[in-house]
Image (spheres, rainbow, N blue to C red):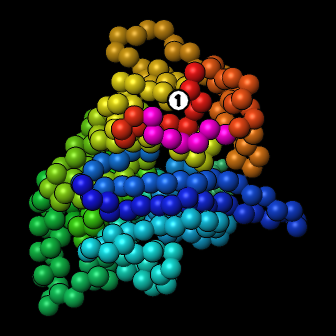
Amino acid sequence: MSEVLKTENLKAFYILEYWGEKRVIKAVSNVNLSIKQNEIYGIAGESGCGKSTLLKALLANLDPPLQLIDGKLFYKTNCDFIDVFSLSKKEIKNLRWSFISYIPQGSMHVLNPVKKVKDSFLEILESHIKAKDIKEYFDLMREHLKDLGLSPEILEAYPHQLSGGMRQRVVIALATLLHPQVILADEPTTALDVVAQRAVIQLLKDIQETFKNTIIIVTHDMGIHAQLTTRMSIMYAGKIIEESPTQEIFKNPIHPYTKYLIQSLPKIGEKEQREGISGSPPSLISPPLGCAFHPRCPEAKPECAEEEPKLIEVSPQHKVACFPN
Ligand code: ADP
Ligand code: MG
């Protein structure tokens, strides 16, 4: 399968100034991704590890205080790789919705509360497609909702008239309206009940199967990754520490942090509370030297505090940043 999006040593930091004092939050460091056409790729990790920031960088949405420090981002549109950071703001804007689209975290707030759903859909269509009349726009909307198995009646609703789960599906329908090749979804199932979560997962699966596009999904919930993604990576302190096909990650996790994330998944019928890992996520202002996970790692060796392990391929398609035992 060919690549559709790739990054080279992507580095994006928040740079804040308080009364003349500079604070640098190293939210995304040295990320190398190679995302293929027609795959659902997952990004996991605890809250605050940089997942949402990485998606913002993949969208080339780098507004202060977030700054691109280093690295490159490429989109493959038609047959060519485009160096995205060399484009003008206007050129990047043109690629949004049509080539790449984004379902932000807390996307309940994406829809304008005082507008009907159809008005949000119309706004996007009008800004990207020249139709001969308004009817053509409405035909496109209805056809798209039909493709997604959603009722066209929702077009007449105001956001507050829809349940949380339905609102989330409407936001997904909106993000896929122009059939983008890449969809970035940030925690699309968080804050939903189990039934609504299942509907959202099914919708994302259906979209991928129908349009053969690429979905990059961020969620801290390893259970969602197990159900939905084909390949995934685990982030810790702004870096990718393990990447592999999802099945392989669950069968053969190598990084102690990945093992912890998998072990902490609740199992059916289990009554006892699972043991958490000690300590808290590291500061992204001054992360620990060596491997950022070493202060919490049950398998840490002296070298882990001194040297940072590189992300290397240990078996085909399986990369890990951890010193071998
Ligand atoms: P995640 O999505 O994995 O929870 P984020 O990418 O949201 O992580 O955050 C990574 C780090 O960047 C955190 O330390 C967070 O506090 C910081 N951060 C996120 N957004 C901002 C912002 N707008 N300004 C300053 N720091 C931010
Ligand atoms: Mg987030």
Q: Amino acid at mark 1?
A: His
Q: Is residue 1 toward the left or the right of residue 188 in the image?
A: left
Q: Position of residue 120 (x, y in %)?
A: 32, 71
User: Would residue 74 be visible to someone looking at this image?
Assistant: yes
Which image quarter is the N terminus in?
A: bottom left
Q: Which residue is mark 1?
A: 255
Residue at (52% x, 49% y) in the render:
51
Please identify the quarter of the rendering in which residue 68 is found.
Answer: bottom right
Q: Is residue 315 toward the left or the right of residue 209 in the image?
A: right
Which image quarter is the C terminus in?
A: top right
Residue projecting furthest to the bottom: 132
Task: Give the vertical position of 67 relative to 282 (above or below).
Answer: below
Residue at (52% x, 29% y) in the render:
255
Residue at (11% x, 67% y) in the render:
143
Q: Position of residue 277 (x, y in %)?
A: 61, 22
On whether residue 325 falls in the magenta region, the answer is no
User: Would residue 97 be visible to someone looking at this image?
Assistant: no
Task: Give the vertical position of 255 relative to 229 (above or below).
Answer: above
- Helix, strand or loop at label 1? It is loop
Which span of residues is magenta-colored? 308-314
Q: Position of residue 314 (x, y in %)?
A: 45, 34
Q: Position of residue 166 (x, y in %)?
A: 28, 50
Please identify the quarter of the rendering in which residue 225 is found.
Answer: top left
